[in-house]
Image (tube, rainbow, N blue to C red):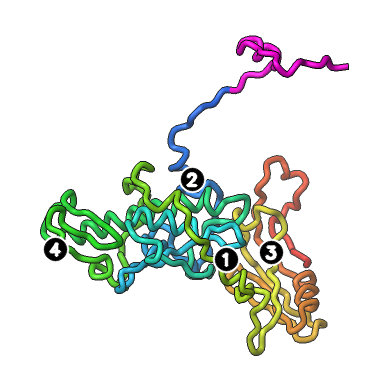
């Protein structure tokens, strides 16, 4: 039976460590934030996705002196559509009323991996912050040329770049680029603000997604209905690393789903899917469609278990 320890018992620190039998040591690893900027996970880009190394993939500046921030994560109630805009507004020296995002579209937004496990802030935050800082640096260089003063003499407030000591000489972000692309690479090397300079991050900002959800007017994907809409399913190669390991489609046997009325195959290069008017028919077609993949062996030590031919048929 464990002894009862009086509430007023005082332990010396050394005695407490001896009794606990454990010592925790914290180590700071330099460059952790920089590692996050490269996503920290393997992301396979599709052929139609925007280039993450282009600044225009992340930010657009409009003629009305506002900015659209392209976010590669889905707003699922975690608040990333507000928090990531705070990071961007901070680095761009814009007000929250001057920044917005659009709902995720896979062919126009940067691929930042899955929206899971707080990834939208942990992985998305450093990228958005760094891209905004790089855009601000580019805008200051443009303003320097337009106002004919060194960058060091410029100040920015709410997207208005002014000459220090002569506020009458100014130009807005919108006037500098106004709807035109930057045509600049995203390098991730722009200097970031010190947290001591923060004016937006850390403040209480109303969530962008809450009003529509509270009013019941938020349009979830399940609510979308359009004329002639079909149900679809993606047909994937077996194995979690199949896409990352470069699986290629060698052949698709469309006759394998001929018995499912109205089901048809959708293929674009190495993407394969099926659609049907009825959802269960789409599910059955995805399981039944025969696809032959050129899928290289990825795990060590499996050579004696795998077929000699790496071209594996996938029966769904």
Front residue of 11 and 313: 11
Q: At 83% across and 14% down in the image, what residue appears?
A: 3
Local SS, label 4 = strand
Distance from disc 2 to disc 3, alpha carbons, whole Å, reads 28 Å
Q: Nearer the viewer, mark 2 or mark 1?
A: 1
For marks 1 and 4 on the same chain, the one whose residue lies earlier in the sequence: 4
Residue beneath label 2, please? 36
Q: Residue 183: x, y in percent? A: 31, 65
Q: Is residue 183 left or right of residue 230?
A: left
Q: Residues within 10 Å of mark 4 (few under 14, many from 20)?
A: few
Front residue of 140 and 260: 140
Distance from disc 2 to disc 1, alpha carbons, whole Å, reads 28 Å
Local SS, label 1 = helix
For marks 2 and 1 on the same chain, the one whose residue lies earlier in the sequence: 2
Residue beneath label 3, please? 236
Q: Residue 168's mark?
A: 4
Query: Which residues, given as a range, are shown in magenta?
Result: 1-24
Q: Is residue 76 above or below residue 281?
A: above
Local SS, label 2 = helix
Residue beneath label 1, please? 210
Query: So how many labels did they put on this image?
Result: 4
Q: Is residue 306 left or right of residue 198?
A: right
Q: Is residue 20 magenta?
A: yes
């Amino acid at each position: 039976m464990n002894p009862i320890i009086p509430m007023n018992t005082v332990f010396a620190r050394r005695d407490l460590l001896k009794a606990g039998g454990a010592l925790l040591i914290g180590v700071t690893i330099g460059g952790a934030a920089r590692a996050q900027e490269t996503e920290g996970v393997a992301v396979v880009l599709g052929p139609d996705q925007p280039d993450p190394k282009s600044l225009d993939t992340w930010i657009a500046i409009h003629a009305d002196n506002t900015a659209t921030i392209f976010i590669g994560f889905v707003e699922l109630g975690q608040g990333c559509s507000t928090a990531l805009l705070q990071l961007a507004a901070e680095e761009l020296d814009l007000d929250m009323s001057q920044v917005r995002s659009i709902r995720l579209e896979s062919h126009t937004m940067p691929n930042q991996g899955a929206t899971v496990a707080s990834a939208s802030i942990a992985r998305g935050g450093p990228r958005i912050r760094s891209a905004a800082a790089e855009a601000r640096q580019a805008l200051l260089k443009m303003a320097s040329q337009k106002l004919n003063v060194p960058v060091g003499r410029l100040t920015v407030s709410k997207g208005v770049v002014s000459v220090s000591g002569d506020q009458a000489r100014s130009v807005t972000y919108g006037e500098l680029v106004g709807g035109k692309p930057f045509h600049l690479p995203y390098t991730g090397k722009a200097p970031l603000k010190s947290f001591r300079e923060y004016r937006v991050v850390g403040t209480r900002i109303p969530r962008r997604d809450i009003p529509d959800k509270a009013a019941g007017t938020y349009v979830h994907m399940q609510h979308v209905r359009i004329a002639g809409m079909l149900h679809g399913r993606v047909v994937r190669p077996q194995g979690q690393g199949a896409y990352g390991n470069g699986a290629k489609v060698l052949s698709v046997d469309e006759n394998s789903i001929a018995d499912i009325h109205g089901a048809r195959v959708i293929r674009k290069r190495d993407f394969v899917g099926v659609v049907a008017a009825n959802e269960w028919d789409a599910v059955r077609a995805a399981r039944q469609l025969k696809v032959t993949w050129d899928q290289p062996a990825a795990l060590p030590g499996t050579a004696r278990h795998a077929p000699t031919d790496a071209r594996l048929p996938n029966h769904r």
